[in-house]
Image (cartoon, rainbow, N blue to C red):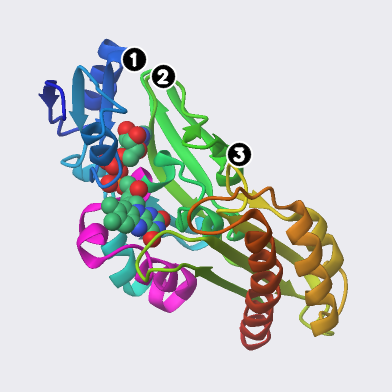
């Protein structure tokens, strides 16, 4: 049962930050409510003050800014990202990821910022954003700061947000030439969270097709989304072959720290990491060759 709380609906970022500063630990921010309301209904979270930020229109946008890359306001819904021509044309991997995230109803309400701040290690956006080398902007009354997406999740459902801080923006840097990025998740029920999710981004040298850079991000494979850096090292500086991708998958499965739960055993998740790194790596490579 949800306990009583006092409700605020600020219309500006400044108003929201002032409320957060005033009520500190006794308040909770709500965006789309798709994750928070479940916790509140279960009695796991019972704030005295609820600050509904969904009406802050200045935090809902998608901007394509040339050399500065793409900027997404934290309150942009999953559905807006899925339907945005900006991503369909320039970063189709985000469109594909959003298209498989939850149901349309949840995508209509849930925000990308809320998803990242919920810090479920099985969430879809974080591994993709890690593969794209994205950063996060946070604001408080003390000012702004930025952080790489991969540093933001500290543990299961725990983030680097300081008291009084809101996530305001996700920044995706320009994608280098000859880069391909792909993502997939294995899930038992379509439109559910990942049992394991894998994102891979590969950048090739223009001349000889050697792998100049690679980023492999794993979801639902550890307490937080992680980079499989030893697996990346297998591919970087080499001409990528099926044999190397298989080796990268094997190494990534040893870097994962999965748990056993009702969806899959630890061993099964390691198998999934091995198979998906190879499969998604192959897709990212094919895209890099066409880019
Ligand atoms: C049936 C169902 C299926 C789902 N399936 C998937 C799936 O397949 N893949 C997936 O990735 N997700 C899935 N989700 C999660 C969902 O899609 C949401 O995207 C997300 O978890 C929460 O977004 P929200 O805006 O609703 O956040 P809320 O629920 O409002 O908030 C979540 C948390 O983030 C905090 N918060 C929100 N916004 C901010 C901000 N700007 N700054 C600081 N803190 C903030 C809140 O205080 C709260 O702790 C599913 C959810 C449901 C209900």
Q: Find disc 3 in the rendering and name its residue.
A: 151
Q: Is residue 95 magenta?
A: yes
Element assignment for label 2: loop
Residue 7 at x, y = what percent? Answer: 11, 25
Magenta residues, start to end = 87-114
Q: Choose top left, top right, bottom left or bottom right for residue 44.
A: top left
Q: Earlier in the sequence, mark 3 or mark 2?
A: 3
Using the image as rendered, state which of residue 166 and residue 186 is in the foreground.
Answer: 186
Q: Earlier in the sequence, mark 3 or mark 1?
A: 1
Q: Are dots 1 and 2 in contact, CB under 8 Å?
A: yes
Ligand 1 closer than 8 Å to the CB at disc 3? no
Give the residue drawn at x 38%, y 70%: 100
Q: Earlier in the sequence, mark 1 or mark 2?
A: 1
Mark 3 → mark 2, Cα distance in angstroms: 17 Å
Q: Find disc 2 in the rendering and name its residue.
A: 163
Give the residue drawn at x 63%, y 88%: 290
Q: Find disc 1 in the rendering and name its residue.
A: 25
Q: Main secondary structure of the magenta part?
A: helix
Give the residue drawn at x 39%, y 76%: 88
Residue 176 at x, y = what percent? Answer: 64, 68
Crowding at dot 1, Cα within 10 Å, few <14 / some 14-19 / many 20+, comes out as few
């Amino acid at each position: 049962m949800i306990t009583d709380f006092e409700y605020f609906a600020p219309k500006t970022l400044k108003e929201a930050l002032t409320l957060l500063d005033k009520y500190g630990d006794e308040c909770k921010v709500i965006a789309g409510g798709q994750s928070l309301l479940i916790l509140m209904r279960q009695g796991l979270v019972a704030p005295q003050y609820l600050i509904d930020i969904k009406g802050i229109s200045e935090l809902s946008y998608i901007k394509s800014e040339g050399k500065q890359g793409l900027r997404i306001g934290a309150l942009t819904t999953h559905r807006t990202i899925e339907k945005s021509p900006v991503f369909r044309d320039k970063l189709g991997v985000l469109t594909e990821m959003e298209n498989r995230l939850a149901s349309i109803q949840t995508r209509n309400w849930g925000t990308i910022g809320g998803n990242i701040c919920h810090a479920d290690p099985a969430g879809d956006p974080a591994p993709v954003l890690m593969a794209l080398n994205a950063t996060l902007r946070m604001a408080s009354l003390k000012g702004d700061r930025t952080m790489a997406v991969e540093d933001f999740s500290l543990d299961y459902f725990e983030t680097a947000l300081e008291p009084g801080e809101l996530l305001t923006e996700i920044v995706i840097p320009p994608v280098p030439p000859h880069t391909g990025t792909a993502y997939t998740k294995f899930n038992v029920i379509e439109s559910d969270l990942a049992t394991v999710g894998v994102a891979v981004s590969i950048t090739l040298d223009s001349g000889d097709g050697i792998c100049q850079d690679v980023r492999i991000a794993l979801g639902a494979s550890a307490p937080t989304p992680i980079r499989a850096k030893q697996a990346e090292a297998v591919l970087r500086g080499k001409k990528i072959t099926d044999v190397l991708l298989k080796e990268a998958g094997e190494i990534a499965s040893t870097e994962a720290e999965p748990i056993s739960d009702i969806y899959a055993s630890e061993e099964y998740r390691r198998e999934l990491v091995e198979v998906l790194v190879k499969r998604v790596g192959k897709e990212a490579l094919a895209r890099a060759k066409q880019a």
